[in-house]
Amino acid sequence: MPTAISIKQVPGKPGEVYYPLEKIVIPTPQPSENQVVVTITAAALNHRDLFIRQHLYPGISFSVPLLADGAGIVTATGSAPSAKKWLYKRVILNPGVGWDSDPEGPESPKGYQIMGGTKNNPTGTLAEVVVLDASELEEQPRHLSDIEAAALPLTGLTAWRAFFTKSGNAKPGRNILVTGIGGGVALMVLLFAAAQGCNVYVSSGSEEKIRKAKELGAAGGVNYKEDGWEKKLIAMLPEGRKWVDAIVDGAGGDVVYKGMKLLKHGGVISIYGMTTSPKMPFVMGAVLKNIEVRGSTMGSRKEFSDMVEFVNKKNLKPIISRVVRGLDIEAIDGLFDDMKKGSQFGKLVVEVSKEAESSKL
């Protein structure tokens, strides 16, 4: 019987509890006509997984494997031609279901159902095998390793929608500020925006992370812990364009107050998360500058396909912070510790198995 990692229920209030990891046995998957079985080679963490362990995420489950990011090899299929065509192919998994192509949001009455650790979707990628509909697969970009491919789905999709769909400024020559550089989504926004010909600037509390971001294509960076960092950023901007066109943010907090000093009239703040606080004040100064705040979360199946196509075209690679091997609870806990401390620069990945390599054709 295949195994997986989930969380174990222990007493504690939301935000105070930290559910321990637990190895569980899952049923041997039997694909229906349109389904495939994927032997997982690698899976990656996201902040939502940490929130699940802290009971700060809705609908958590103690029996569904964790994680929504996954890559692997199709090792069995149902009888439908649409499923059989995937046999032995290296694939990445669309991290959720219920959202086909509507740019405004999920079409499903149940909303967008993300994989990993909740009652909304029975599949999680921190498992030896998963079964899912064949329509939720994309071929792994050939220039990526399994570990790099596993780091792409959720962060790539979230970054794609926040930047390309929501910022309104995915155009060459635009000035884009990406806050909190070092996290997986922020780094993918940096890679996407730089590849699109934008002038990308980053913020961080770490000079080392700013330095690394410049090596990846950022035009400049500022330390948000320094007083007056906004003026320092403006001084970095190109002559004749001393404003920021859009901010892509995952922290919330005082981003509107700080952002209104930087953004052009009609500038956009595309926000995909609020790690600082679940509330964010909107101030009158932003109203007077016609600044828009646009919420952005995950993305549609079409956006996922578009994102993978762009990654292939531009030969982009997700940034990997650290990798552990096997469904080793102690090692995986170490990755969660990295995320709690905010010490990572890039994605935290679990190499689940190398055994599926022998299944490649």
Image (spheres, helix red, strand yellow):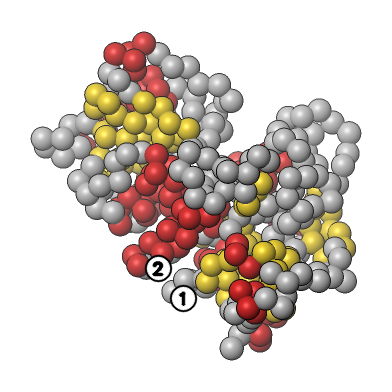
The reply to whether residue 280 is in sight is yes
* Residue 215, numbered label: none
Marks 1 and 2 sit apart, C-alpha to C-alpha, by 8 Å
* Rendered location of residue 262, percent (x, y): 28, 27
In which quadrant will I find the N terminus?
bottom right
Tag shown at residue 142: 1
Disc 1 residue crowd, few under 14, some 14–19, many 20+, Cα 10 Å: few
Q: Quadrant of residue 293?
A: top left
Helix, strand or loop at disc 2?
Answer: helix
Around disc 2, counting alpha carbons within 10 Å, would you say few (fewer than 14), some (14 to 19), or many (20 or more)? some
Marks 1 and 2 close (CB-CB < 8 Å): yes
Relative to 259, does residue 315 appear above or below in the rendering? Answer: below
Report the side of 336 relative to 163 (left or right): right
- Is any part of residue 184 visible from this angle? no
Residue shown at 36% from the left, 53% from the top = 192
Residue 74 left/right relative to 255: right
Q: Quadrant of residue 226?
A: top left
Residue 126 point in image, percent of width and height: 72, 60
The residue that label 2 is drawn on is 312
Q: Residue at image x 66%, y 86%?
A: 358
